[in-house]
């Protein structure tokens, strides 16, 4: 649905959120096919608000009458207000409170986005609670629903760029405590899916980006401010956030017991050096590097998802142009670096 004549610039956050919530044709088709209300758990994070809005917009285009409910602590009241204005119902909730999750409304379709990554080393107990305990609560509450659960490409081991990235059937090999809890999350969903016949899809994401956060913004800010770029983590996958959300919606039609696993990633394996040189050209600046590219990185092969739901609509070159323009105009960012350069799994 994103028009072929893409804008040279995205003016501000309002225009960005509108653009990020533009549904794809496959997301519209999926919501036309799948009946029932939709609840998005953990909807107040980086991707959740635009996912909820995309579901609302795609449902309206598909002509389906359903509730779209966003659940979060909503520490940012502005996010909640915007969702309410866009026709998304909001509920403030501590998902780790069994009584609160039990009181949530029924919904035939569940998107589970609540997760913890950064700060794992300092607060591992919370990470385990959110990533491993919470999925059990979700499955118990929504045992009669379809569940699309976001996971991470970090459950795979580091692989070489020449491999094309890990595929869904590859042997997993989590490295570090966060990655272990990400695998723990998947195993809990797998257990309940098999035991209670809950249809589930597990989305292994590497890495969603837009102008306010993500790997490409991290690199853009470093280049813009003249920082030396460490090339040790030499390669990366990225996918435009709207494309990742559209794939998640389309995956509703593929929930299964046992769960289906789908990698969500762009088709390209990008070289960090090339990204930074592209950005330096956009900024009209020089860029300096240090370190030597390791032969491996956390890389996903998203070809199965592309075959099922279509290729991403926005290319990395286009994203880089928009991000460079955003940085030059000093537009807002979330101030949440990804730490994608970390290789020891300690986030």
Image (tube, helix red, strand yellow):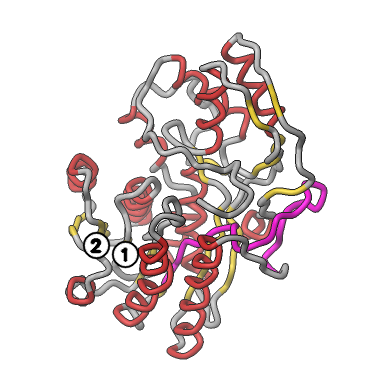
Secondary structure beneath dot 1 equals strand
Image-based side of 336 in relation to 338, left or right: left
Left-right relation of 302 to 95: right
Whether residue 300 appears in magenta in the rendering, the answer is no
Point out which mark residue 38 bears. Answer: 1
Q: x, y (%) of residue 59?
A: 34, 56
Q: Tell me the element at label 2.
A: loop
Q: Give yes or no for contact between labels 2 and 1 (Cβ–Cβ under 8 Å).
A: yes
Q: Is residue 159 magenta?
A: yes
Which one is nearer the viewer's eye here, 268 or 235? 235
| Highlighted range, magenta | 147-169
How far apart marks 2 and 1 lie (CA) works out to 6 Å
Rendering coords of residue 234 (x, y %): 71, 38
Q: Residue sitting at 54 percent across and 76 percent down?
A: 259
Measuring from the top left, give residue 143's x and y in whole percent.
35, 82
- The answer to whether 290 is drawn above or below residue 188 in the figure is above
Asked if 238 appears above or below 13 in the picture, the reply is below
Q: Quadrant of residue 134?
A: bottom left
Q: Dot 1: few (<14), some (14–19), or many (≥20) neighbours within 10 Å?
A: many
The one of 196 and 125 positioned closer to us in this rendering: 125
Residue at the image point whose x is 65% and y is 62% from the top:
156
Say whether disc 2 or disc 1 marks the residue closer to the N-terminus: 1
The quadrant in which residue 305 appears is: bottom right
Q: Residues within 10 Å of mark 2 (few under 14, many from 20)?
A: some
- Which residue shows up at 56% across the image and 16% down it? 226
For disc 2, the marked residue is: 67
Q: Looking at this rendering, what residue extends furthest in the bottom direction?
A: 195
Q: Is residue 260 above or below residue 332?
A: below
Q: Nearer the viewer, residue 264 or 290?
A: 290
Instruction: Name the residue at 43% across, 47% down.
Output: 23
The image position of residue 211, as x and y in percent, is: 45, 31
Q: Residue furthest right?
A: 162
């Amino acid at each position: 649905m994103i028009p072929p004549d893409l804008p040279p610039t995205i003016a501000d956050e309002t225009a960005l959120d509108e653009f990020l919530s533009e549904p794809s044709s496959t997301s519209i088709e999926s919501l036309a096919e799948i009946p029932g209300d939709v609840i998005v758990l953990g909807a107040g994070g980086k991707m959740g608000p635009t996912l909820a809005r995309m579901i609302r917009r795609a449902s309206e285009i598909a002509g389906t009458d359903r509730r779209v409910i966003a659940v979060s602590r909503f520490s940012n009241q502005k996010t909640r207000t915007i969702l309410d204005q866009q026709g998304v119902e909001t509920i403030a909730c501590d998902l780790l409170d069994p009584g609160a999750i039990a009181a949530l409304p029924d919904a035939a379709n569940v998107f589970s986005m609540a997760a913890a990554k950064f700060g794992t080393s300092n607060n591992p107990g919370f990470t385990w609670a959110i990533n491993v305990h919470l999925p059990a609560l979700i499955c118990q509450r929504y045992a009669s629903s379809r569940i699309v659960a976001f996971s991470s490409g970090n459950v795979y081991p580091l692989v070489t760029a020449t491999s094309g990235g890990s595929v869904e059937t590859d042997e997993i090999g989590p490295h570090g405590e966060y990655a272990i809890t990400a695998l723990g999350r998947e195993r809990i969903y797998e257990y309940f899916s098999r035991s209670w016949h809950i249809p589930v899809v597990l989305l292994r994401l590497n890495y969603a980006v837009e102008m306010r956060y993500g790997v490409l913004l991290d690199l853009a800010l470093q280049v813009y401010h003249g920082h030396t770029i460490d090339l040790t983590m030499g390669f990366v996958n990225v996918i435009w956030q709207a494309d990742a959300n559209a794939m998640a919606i389309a995956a509703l039609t593929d929930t299964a017991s046992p769960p289906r696993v789908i990698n969500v990633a762009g088709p390209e394996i990008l070289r960090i050096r090339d990204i930074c040189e592209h950005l330096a050209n956009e900024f009209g600046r020089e860029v300096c590097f240090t370190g030597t590219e390791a032969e491996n990185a956390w890389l996903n092969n998203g070809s199965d998802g592309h075959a099922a739901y279509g290729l991403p609509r926005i290319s990395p070159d286009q994203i880089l142009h928009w991000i460079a323009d955003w940085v030059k105009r000093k537009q807002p960012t979330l101030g949440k670096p990804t730490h994608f350069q970390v290789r020891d799994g300690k986030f």
